[in-house]
Amino acid sequence: MAWVFLSMDWMTAFTEMVNDMRRQITRISAALCALLLLAGLTPAAASTSDTSQIIRVGLYYGTGALATANLDNADGKGSGHRFGYFQEDGSFIQVGSTAEEQISMLKSTNIYLTASGTYSETASAGDAGVVGCYHLQLPDGYSDFDSAQAAASQLSQGFVAWINGTYHVRWGSFADSQEAQAAVGELQTELAGLGWNTDGVSVCWTTQYGVTVTKTGTTQILFQFDGEAEELALGVMPDITGAADVQTWFKNYKYHGGFRYQRIGGGNLTVVNMVPLETYVKGVIPYEMSGSWPLEALKAQAVAARTYAVRNLDGHASYHFDVCNTTCCQAYYGEGNGSSRYPTAVSNQAVDETAGELLWYDGELASTNFSASNGGGSESAVNVWGTDYPYLVGKLDPYESSIADIIPGYEWTVTFTADELTEILNDLNYGNSQIVDLEVTRRSETRNVLEIRFTDSEGKTYTFARERVRTLLGLRSMRYEVTAGGSGGSGYSINGETTVENLVGLYLISGNGATSAITEERPYIIDGSGTTERLPAGGGSGETDADEFTITGTGYGHHVGMSQWGAYAMAQQGYTYEEILLFYYTGTYLGTAG
């Protein structure tokens, strides 16, 4: 159907709009900030937006975009919905409304109503009807919504369509143009009965960017929106009066603010929640921490979450929003669903008491990365992602251990057989004969793993560094030890008296009396004949040829920046949110938008 739309001559009459207004004056600097971020640069203080702005949160997009999406504000906090579009600064321009509290947005193709009252793109036996993409249209346009709505309400199947700034009255919905053409006479008869002009009735449809609004669970069309361009997308604001701060149900969660439905590339609906910054932060805190945690920890999280949002404006530029609602950015589910996690009085207090505060470093917004637990030591960003930030540096964390007994999965163990490791590498196209050894070959100063090496039965090695030391095997963290089992040895004997499993941390004494620390778990040695070889794992002779490898570690996450459980521990010990932030983000300071 979309290709038929694209072939229509009138589609070429409108090729671009909204490109002349990138930001209002109050957001020009924010756009510059976003462009710098996209270019891989760090924004300067003068390039930061104020914190009263609207944050665009992607809820469904990409392969997860929706053919249909329902809204429901029937909870006593306002009624009905307003239709329109959002300008670049987030302000809403109203072009229509409905008193209905339960509405559905459908991409303007043939959408079928199933017997159970849900919508489907596919027709099936027993369907209750179809919201077709063809309609009949009265010949004259209208100057405003009220006059068009007054006319549409007198027709049995009438509804208002806003088509790129002009109001039209349309009638019915049909699955194909022939069916629509066959119904012209029926509409003309209805018009004649009202004493209206019967000439000029035509078959019409929307472009590939059109969105149809129905009363949920029916084929009744309430409104149709078509900006005839991808950039001009349908916006919906709850409460027909605009007076109430309505919490609108969407996909079993309640959200503040409005919603935007954009058909990127003419596809399904990209659903974006348009919400004020501080309200957004309130919807992040209970999902990144618990709303019952100590206030100072929640305040630290509020500053980190707010800074992340402002620093990442236009972070998902290809989908036309700032941040997503998953842990890819920050978890966000608005007011929640009242079952497990949701904003509390304490979490909202944390946001209110830090309102507008952002974290800075040397005049620039800081990258406020955080993870659940560092297991005893954070890590420098350059060692994990290859990007060096002077304030994201690894340091030993003395706080988490004080609450280790309440941190879920703080200590963890996983075992891989040699066959499993062989299969993992083969699946990644690292062809190998058979993995016989896995070892940690490099660590950071905070004892996190920076490099691992696999060896196969033919002596070929496969080395992985940075974040892949965790993600390659799906480990909980990069803070761990590897123990080989099977045919390998069981430790190193020192002077025939003491046996140790790991040489790292011990010292060597050279012939001239100089000492040096052992930094590798399997250092190289020179035998009596002068031959250099790698010390076997576990004190055995030759390669380990281990049957299995047990990995034991602590922590959960990427280790960069703030540990959330570490923040909890620090708050319990009486530290303020500022002290928490300055510990995990070295050399930073608090400030407001510049």
Image (cartoon, rainbow, N blue to C red):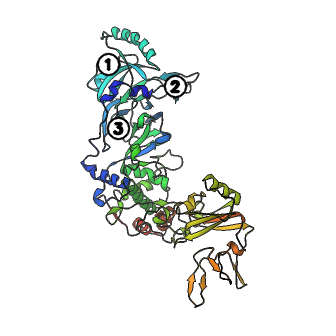
Circle 3 Cα neighbour tier, 10 Å, few/some/many (<14 / 14–19 / ≥20): many
Circle 2 Cα neighbour tier, 10 Å, few/some/many (<14 / 14–19 / ≥20): many
Which residue extends farthest bottom?
A: 512
Q: Which circle, 2 or 3, is nearer the viewer?
A: 3
CA–CA distance between discs 1 and 3? 29 Å
Residue 256 in sight from this viewpoint: no
CA–CA distance between discs 1 and 2? 27 Å
The quadrant in which residue 556 appears is bottom right
Whole-percent x and y of residue 96?
33, 30
Quadrant location of the C terminus in the rendered image: bottom left
Quadrant location of the N terminus in the rendered image: top left
The earlier-in-sequence mark between 1 and 2 is 2
Q: Nearer the viewer, residue 187 or 10?
A: 10
Q: Which residue is mark 2?
A: 113
Placement of 326 over or under 162, stated as above or below? below
Q: Secondary structure at mark 2?
A: strand
The kind of residue tagged 3 is Glu
Residue 529 in sight from this viewpoint: yes
The residue depicted at 63 percent of the width and 67 percent of the height is 439
The kind of residue tagged 2 is Leu
Q: Secondary structure at mark 1?
A: helix
Whole-percent x and y of residue 484?
69, 67
Q: Which circle, 1 or 3, is nearer the viewer?
A: 3
Q: Which residue is mark 3?
A: 231
The quadrant in which residue 285 appears is bottom left
Q: Mark 1–mark 2 contact, CB under 8 Å?
A: no
Q: Nearer the viewer, residue 218 or 127?
A: 127
The kind of residue tagged 1 is Ala
The quadrant in which residue 184 appears is top left
Whole-percent x and y of residue 130?
49, 22
